[in-house]
Amino acid sequence: MKSPRKHILFLCSWFPNREKALEGNFILKHATYIQTFVNVHLCFARSSKDNVEKFELEEEIIEGVRVTKVYYKSSTLPVLKTFINLQRYVKAMKMAYAKGGVAYDLAHVNVAFPAGLFALHLKRKHNLPYIITEHWSGYLSATKIFEKSSSFIKKIHQRIFKEAQHIFTVSNTLGEALKQHQLINDFEVLPNYIDVNLFSPSAQKASIFTFVHVSTVDEMTKNFNGILTALRGLKEQGFDFNFNLVVEADEKEVAEKLRKFGLDELTNLYSYLPSKEVARVIGESHCLIQFSNFETFSIVLAEAWLSGIPCVYSKCGGLTDLADTVLGIQVNKKDVNQLQSALRQMISEGDTYSPNDIHERAKSFLSPALIREKYERLLV
């Protein structure tokens, strides 16, 4: 006789919403995978710039996951707005939680703040244990965002982590950063969920050697100018290649930047593609470029490796810390000359990489089965 399915409450600090359509979309993908073996109710709340009177609730079912979102009016009062908005946030999450109507076995906080505030409330009132999966780059020394937070906000973070039953981080880099801030003593790495069937080796390849880059093209994080500088150098040296660029950004602004670097005629520019199209574009390319200044995980690196294509990537945390010649060429962050040299090497030697070897190596540490195993261990 099968055991009844457990009920998991997903409390999300990030989630796709009317203000930011792609925020935390990887959390949604994780929830839809978890839904295959437990029942998930996902709750999310945030302030809204729209004309919200007080609170506005939305419900929907996304790939089997029950999602409840609540928007609330943001306070603009000087000094008091932080406290007022946190109170409104907790009230909004209470409204979302009330729609569940079941006894939960576990709460799963995705990004500790602010969702962990409501997890603390549920633990105190209903003795509901909670775990945390942390993604936020703000804890990294490269950003110093947490370091610059007020003592009030830091104390909230400390309490949220202290009361958690278990801490997952998406990379060792992030876990060590949390330890440096004395927020945790121990952690376990839990990779982001990637669909290994969607992202798999493709026989359809572009006729000309094609690089691909997928990102927000945010300069502080992704060093997009560094990538364009290296590619411009290759073009000036007479190398023949194309560039697939998938962005979550203003397409006109990106197109203008490509024109200034003289790369517009070599580039196939796409914006805000669904996952299936991202998989297609990556799959038909020959090499992914990732030149970030910092990463907590690097989903696109995982997607490229599962798609069987080698990568040129900067060592900056998360998956980028893997130095494995089966997977590609690791370079130093911000070293444009080294990046350009690695890209030249890829053009000449890219066909020596085995798509199946890359895919299988990536599956060894990215398989969804690993996520399920770690998750079910906590539900025993």
Image (tube, rainbow, N blue to C red):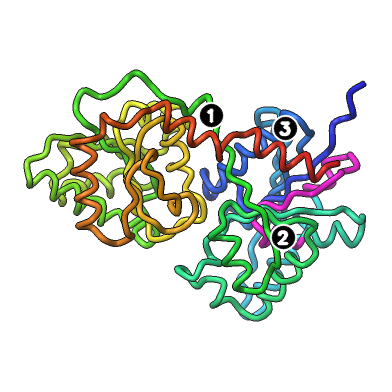
Please determine whether, in this image, residue 155 is positioned above or below residue 258: below
Q: Residues within 10 Å of mark 3 (few under 14, many from 20)?
A: some
- Distance from the alpha carbon under mark 3 to that under mark 2: 26 Å
In the picture, measured across the screen, residue 379 lies left or right of residue 253, that is right
Assign a secondary structure to mark 3: loop
Q: Position of residue 213 (x, y in %)?
A: 33, 42
Of tags 3 and 2, the one toward the viewer is: 3
Which label was assigned to residue 196? 1
Question: Which quarter of the picture shows residue 207?
Answer: top left
Please name the residue that numbered disc 3 is placed on. Answer: 35
Marks 2/1 in contact by CB < 8 Å: the verdict is no
Magenta range: 96-117
Residue at position x 84%, y 61% in the image: 121
Which label was assigned to residue 176? none
Marks 3/1 in contact by CB < 8 Å: the verdict is no
Residue at position x 42%, y 59% in the image: 316
- Distance from the alpha carbon under mark 2 to that under mark 1: 36 Å
Q: Nearer the viewer, residue 89 or 12?
A: 12
In the picture, measured across the screen, residue 25 lies left or right of residue 293, that is right
Of tags 2 and 1, the one toward the viewer is: 1
Q: Position of residue 222 (x, y in %)?
A: 36, 55
Q: Please say whether residue 108 is one of the residues in the magenta stretch.
A: yes
In the picture, measured across the screen, residue 5 lies left or right of residue 69, that is right
Please determine whether, in this image, residue 168 is positioned above or below residue 104: below
Q: Nearer the viewer, residue 111 or 363?
A: 363
For badge 1, the amino acid type reads Val
For badge 3, the amino acid type reads Gln
Residue at position x 43%, y 43% in the image: 301
- Distance from the alpha carbon under mark 3 to that under mark 1: 17 Å
Which label was assigned to residue 89? 2
Q: Nearer the viewer, residue 100 or 233?
A: 233
For badge 2, the amino acid type reads Tyr
